[in-house]
Amino acid sequence: MKQLIVIIAALFIVIPNTFAGGPWTKSKNSYYLKLSEWWTVFDQHYTDLGLIDPNVTTGVFNTSFYGEYGLTDRFNVIANVPVFSRNYMNNVRSRTTGEIIIPGEALNAIGDIDLGLKYGLSQGSFPVSVSVFLGLPTGTIGGGSQGNLQTGDGEFNQMIQLDAGSGFQLGSINGYASTYVAFNNRTKQFSEEIRYGAEVGLGFWNRRVWINARLQAVESLKNGATAETVTSTSIFANNTEFISLGSELAVYLTDKLGVSAGFAGAVRGEVIAAAPSYSVGVFIDINK
């Protein structure tokens, strides 16, 4: 049961990175708003040895609001708010009799909120930015009769991130490439993390249709408490590692309004679901 708690918690880390602005900052009084739905349903997972084991069918659904606003041409404020999160587990049945051993349950609550501040160190053809994110423990932990349903990790974390990138042109096709590296400091005996990733995107039809390919990774420093010395709540999502590949399609219906759809999945992992995740969203992009 402790292992399953950790697996479910790790799902919230592999959610596609909504901080998709990369090194580019919004200009003063410009903003980007997005309402999205992300979900995954899985019946197997990567163990702490990187092997795949089965588990009871579990689903996680997050409805999130993301916003980025330009205080100045260099300073942006960022908020990612999972306004509704649903975590459920199916019934656990006996393989011999078919009887229900553990009834299925569900938890509906708000998730953990992320707040950030981004500063553009350089702009122009090769922008570089630095960001600080605060992860607030606003989600629910230890829910359900078994204490294995949750919508957050219960700890306050601080992450500093460095982004760099550049735009390019391929004939009539616009493109961009960006990369990032981050250090995530965690509390309550959770291990610190190194995060890194890269993204390449192409814009078609006068930049009204964008498609990207994205790599994201988390490497745990494994310097926190272990499962044998702390409670199940304290080991929530500890020592998770993964490399995830994904893609997203964004279509501007007007100059300011658009829709998006994407997917991602771990190609290597430890204590993480072995199943893809999906997302759909609607966004408003206002440039002053």
Image (cartoon, grey):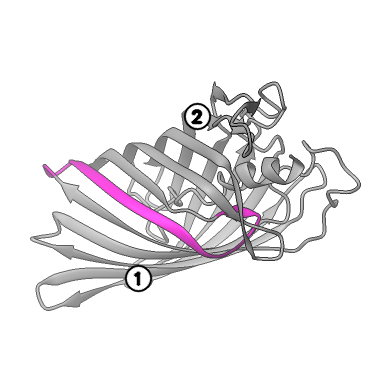
Residue 177 got which mark? 1
Q: Nearer the viewer, residue 59 or 264?
A: 59
Find numbered disc 2 in the image and state the secondary structure of the residue it sits on. strand
Where, quadrant-wise, is the N terminus in this rendering? top right
Q: Disc 1 to disc 2, how far (Cα)?
A: 32 Å
Instruction: Tell me which amino acid carries mark 1.
Output: Ala
* Disc ID at residue 85: 2
The answer to whether residue 287 of the structure is visible from this angle is: no
At a point 50% along the width and 37% down the height, the residue shown is: 59
Disc with the residue nearer the chain's start (1 vs 2): 2
Secondary structure found at label 1: strand
* Residue stretch in magenta: 253-273
Q: Mark 2 belongs to which amino acid?
A: Ser
Question: Where's the C terminus, which quadrant?
Answer: top left
Q: Position of residue 269 (x, y in %)?
A: 60, 63
Q: Is residue 195 above or below residue 263?
A: below
